[in-house]
Amino acid sequence: MDAWLYNGKDADDVFGILGIRAEGSRSMNSRKLVVLDEYINLFNARYPSAATDSFIVLRDGFGGEADFTRVLSMAKLRPESERMIANTSKYQGELFSKWMVEDMLEPKGVLSTVLEGGSYGTARSEDKLVVNHYNVFYKRRTREQ
């Protein structure tokens, strides 16, 4: 990690070096996320003006919110460990909270706004899964308010 820092690698570079994207949904069970978090802490301490966090790095590394939420929904569908469940819940909660609070997105808008799909009937199965997960999250949060 010190070599990466010394050579000016940012967290996005380390995401690529670790090959997290290639692991897809299984990345939520990977020790590589721990390494990435540790590197982000080092990077942020050294370069506070360029500080980032794991959510941003993962979201961008997977290609944006749409692809990241698909990865998370697939990980939630087939969890392999408690770590995978915890990571998936953490990042999915952060993303869904953003959609609900900042974007004021209702479940019916996820497919067209985030996933850029057509109707629910013609949507890909992983997109339907995202919509279903967000719907559960949304209903739970609106009941709590």
Image (cartoon, grey):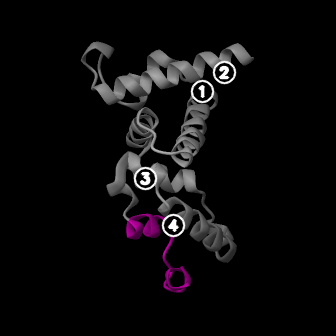
Nearest to viewer (mark 1 / mark 2): 2
Taking the image as drawn, is residue 100 in sight?
A: yes
Residue that sits furthest to the front in the current view = 81
Question: Marks 4/2: CA distance?
Answer: 32 Å
Of 63 and 26, the residue lying toward us = 26
Q: The residue under label 4 is which amino acid type? A: Ala
* Residue at disc 2, secondary structure: helix
Q: What label does residue 27 carry, if any? A: 3
Is 122 included in the stretch rendered in magenta?
A: no
Of helix, strand and loop, which one carries label 4?
helix
Going from N to C along the chain, the mark reached first, 1 or 2, is 1
Residue 11, disc: 4
* Label 3 vs label 1, nearer the camera: 3
Going from N to C along the chain, the mark reached first, 4 or 2, is 4
| Magenta extent | 1-18
Mark 4 is surrounded, within 10 Å at the Cα level, by few (under 14), some (14 to 19) or many (20 or more) other residues, namely: many
Q: CA distance from mark 3 to mark 2?
A: 27 Å
Q: Are marks 3 and 2 in contact (CB under 8 Å)?
A: no
Q: Which mark is residue 141?
A: 2
Q: Are marks 1 and 2 in contact (CB under 8 Å)?
A: yes
Residue in the image at 36% along x and 22% along y: 128
CA neighbours of label 1 inside 10 A, class few (<14), some (14 to 19), many (20+): some
Which label is found at residue 100?
1
**Residue 9 among those drawn in magenta:** yes
Residue at (61, 72) in percent of width and height: 43
Of discs 3 and 2, which sits in the foreground? 3
Q: Which mark is residue 120?
A: none
